[in-house]
Image (cartoon, helix red, strand yellow):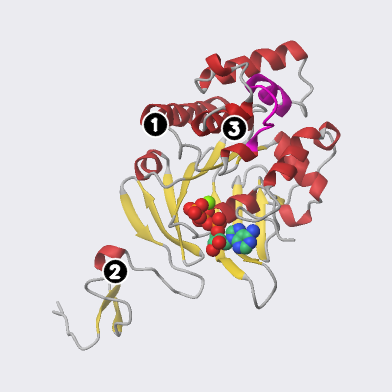
Amino acid sequence: MTGGPDGPSGPASSDRGTRAAPHAAEADLPPQDDAGASGPALRCVNVVHVYGAAGAGVVALRGIDLSVAAGEMVAVVGSSGAGKSTLLWLLAGLIRPTAGRLFVHGRALGDLSSGDLASLRARQVGVLLQNPARNLLPYGTALDNVLFAQRPTRRRPAVKSARSRALLDAVGLDAQRDRVAGALSGGEQQRLGLAMALANGPAVLLADEPTSQLDAASAARVVDLLQAARKDLGTTVLMVTHDEALAAQLDRAVTIRDGRIGAEARAGQDYVVIGRDGALHLPPEVLDVLPPGTLAEVRRTSDGIELRPAGQDGDKA
Ligand SMILES: Nc1ncnc2c1ncn2[C@@H]1O[C@H](COP(=O)(O)OP(=O)(O)OP(=O)(O)O)[C@@H](O)[C@H]1O
Ligand SMILES: [Mg+2]
């Protein structure tokens, strides 16, 4: 069976397995590759993912190339079904790619066993899945859940308890501390999931639409919390979001289109990303000039290239 964001085998089992297996957290991981600690925190090289049987499968990702520096905060945007959650699941090691390579702090995920991946998630990679309920133990209280998330650590019980309370305060759930997680609202569950994902001070946080069920004030609080994690721990954040305002607050926003990173926005400037085969996605706002199917001419100029509909000679300076 192929698991995945929409699939029947939810991450709850894998993710929970991570947190439930302290022995795995203490296992030795294979050494890092030559990218080492000084390389990017996250790297995807031509990652392809197809769900289901070959020939009848759904192609979710067609060749993702992405590099995220340590301490960077990057938003992943794109229309529904673009493959955002698939990318997050792959980086979390919850599913394996059909082709391509993924690295977390220089470790090739393809070289790691499921136990190693569980250990990586427990120790270094906090994961917040899109469906808030999937991140939780529904019958435990909010406090139990954050304590549970810390099982892989060797902290003393008093330290775990103090940290749990501090995190619940930070996400605005101090009053819900003793409420059963399954009975919390969607937004409360989302915030609890974030507290759990941050519980072990991860080097990398992968968060799938962490603010989708929050009001503006709570969403702003989440961003503050992530900024604080970056400042205090150097946490790298990859956040899937549909919220443009939130995406604009991060260092950059990459857009998945047609299964690859087609565009990137940083510091208020939009860029297109040239694909491996030279393909580029024109931004929607110029499609009236060059609608799909247009025969276009590409000319080299002194400082770049020029693209214009065929048969239209431009002024040549
Ligand atoms: N387990 C699965 N089995 C088959 N197809 C799947 C599975 N999970 C996802 N897909 C398909 O893969 C594609 C990408 O899905 P994904 O969930 O990654 O998109 P997304 O960008 O996160 O969408 P949304 O914004 O709606 O959450 C979609 O066409 C989806 O239907
Ligand atoms: Mg999704």
Occupied quadrant, residue 224: top left
Q: Which secondary structure lies at badge 3? A: helix
Q: Is residue 147 magenta?
A: yes
The kind of residue tagged 2 is: Asp
Gap in angstroms between the C-alphas marked 3 and 1 = 16 Å
Q: Which secondary structure lies at badge 1? A: loop
- Residue 31 can be seen in this image: no
Question: Which residue sits at x=45%, y=40%?
Answer: 212
Gap in angstroms between the C-alphas marked 3 and 2 = 49 Å
The kind of residue tagged 3 is: Gly
What percent of the width, then of the height, locates residue 193?
59, 32
What percent of the width, then of the height, locates residue 171?
51, 23
Does the residue tagged 2 have its C-beta within 8 Å of any atom of ligand 1? Answer: no
User: Pointer 2: residues within 10 angstroms few (<14), some, or many (20+)?
Assistant: few
Q: Which of marks 3 and 1 is nearer the N terminus?
A: 3
The kind of residue tagged 1 is: Asp
- Which residue is tagged 1? 215
Q: Earlier in the sequence, mark 1 or mark 2?
A: 1
Mark 3 vs mark 2, foreground winner is: 3
What percent of the width, then of the height, locates residue 236?
56, 38
Part of the protein shown in magenta: 135-149
- Which residue is tagged 3? 193
148 horizontally vs 266: left or right: right
Name the foreground residue: 188 vs 49. 188
Quadrant where the C terminus sits is bottom left
User: Pointer 3: residues within 10 angstroms few (<14), some, or many (20+)?
Assistant: many
Gap in angstroms between the C-alphas marked 1 and 2 = 46 Å
Q: Which secondary structure lies at badge 2? A: loop
- Which residue is tagged 2? 303
